[in-house]
Image: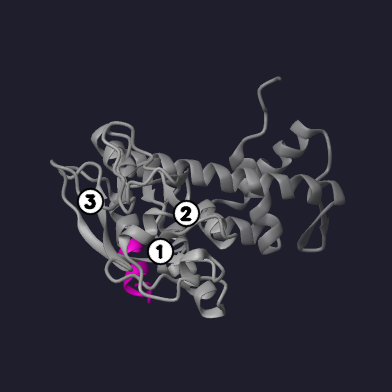
Amino acid sequence: MPSPKVTLDQWRTLAAVVDHGGFAQAAERLHRSQSSISYTVAKLQEQLGMQLLVTEGRRSRITPAGTLLLERARALVDEAARLEQLAHNVEAGWEPEIRLVVDAAFPGDVLMRGLRAFAPRSRGSHVRLEEVILSGADEALQEGLADLAIGSRVPPGFLGDTLLEIEFVAVAHPDHPLHLLGRPLTQTDLKRELQVVIRDSGQRQPRDVGWLGPELRWTVTHFDTALSAVRNGLGFGWLPRHQVAALLGGGDLLPLPLRQGAVYRSPLYLIPGHPDRPGPATLELADCLRAACAATDAP
């Protein structure tokens, strides 16, 4: 493909003439001489081999061909401006990408609220989001694969702040055999039934939080799958209250009447991946996530 002959400045000049109604107005807007504006547009038309403007009295009107080309040119000019701004931001230390690792127990609506607040402040930084379970966040931090993490514990060598607490509640389908017993349940009762367990996504030291140890278990890789299994009566499990609140309210699931352990709480922490040198974009995203948590009613 041959190199373009037309410059971005020529397209920017043509746009100024069209937007402000003439050469004199464009010259005033761009702080240039009128003769410079006229020469730039004339050269542009010569290079393209077509007329882009027609003069009507003291005003200039764009031709249909000019309208078509200018529409595309505006996108090029805007993208070039964004590219230059991104280069300036990178030079100033603003990260081009943030690797965000989030424990899947974190409420999705709160996460989206934080990301939505960050988007207009991102200065072109991309967010690469990875959802993990339990020690998956630990490993991402320890292996240098996360610029910012939301995890259930702060691994050694890192610092973190509590974002919120997630409440897990033991639930089962209303027709599950455990509910049909009609009395408070013990751990022995639970061990006779199938438990749905969410697998730790970490590989080095996986944790079995909430697993009672029986052989009667099905292991899944995400909370949504666990919820579907429990909702369809395949077993019981501990699930985040924010995930099952509507189903509990509608009677599609019921909390298990356990003597002990029907509910447990787990904090989630916000942990910078580089505690000694967090980048400005990472700090901005962290502030947006904190604000999103502060504004939520999630338990």
The quarter holding residue 9 reads top right
Dot 2: few (<14), some (14–19), or many (≥20) neighbours within 10 Å? many
Q: Is 27 colored magenta in this rendering?
A: no
Q: Secondary structure at mark 2?
A: helix
Q: Secondary structure at mark 3?
A: loop
Q: Which residue is mark 2?
A: 223
Identity of the residue drawn at 65% across and 41% down: 40
Q: Nearer the viewer, residue 54 or 34?
A: 54
| Residue at mark 3 to residue at mark 2: CA–CA distance | 19 Å
Q: Which residue is mark 1?
A: 240
Q: Secondary structure at mark 1?
A: strand
* Residue depth check, mark 3 versus mark 2: number of the one nearer the observer: 2
Residue 6 falls left or right of residue 194 = right
Residue 59 falls left or right of residue 297 = right
Q: Amino acid at mark 1?
A: Pro
x, y (%) of residue 254? Answer: 48, 73
Among numbered discs 2 and 1, the one appearing first in the sequence: 2
Dot 1: few (<14), some (14–19), or many (≥20) neighbours within 10 Å? many
The quarter holding residue 167 reads bottom left
Q: Nearer the viewer, residue 53 or 270?
A: 270
Q: Which residue is mark 3?
A: 153
Is residue 149 placed above or below 257 in the rendered structure? Answer: above
- Discs 3, 2 touching: Cβ within 8 Å: no
Residue located farthest toward the top when viewing the structure as drawn: 1
Q: Amino acid at mark 3?
A: Arg
What are the residue bounds of the magenta stretch?
288-299
- Discs 2, 1 touching: Cβ within 8 Å: yes
Total marks drawn? 3
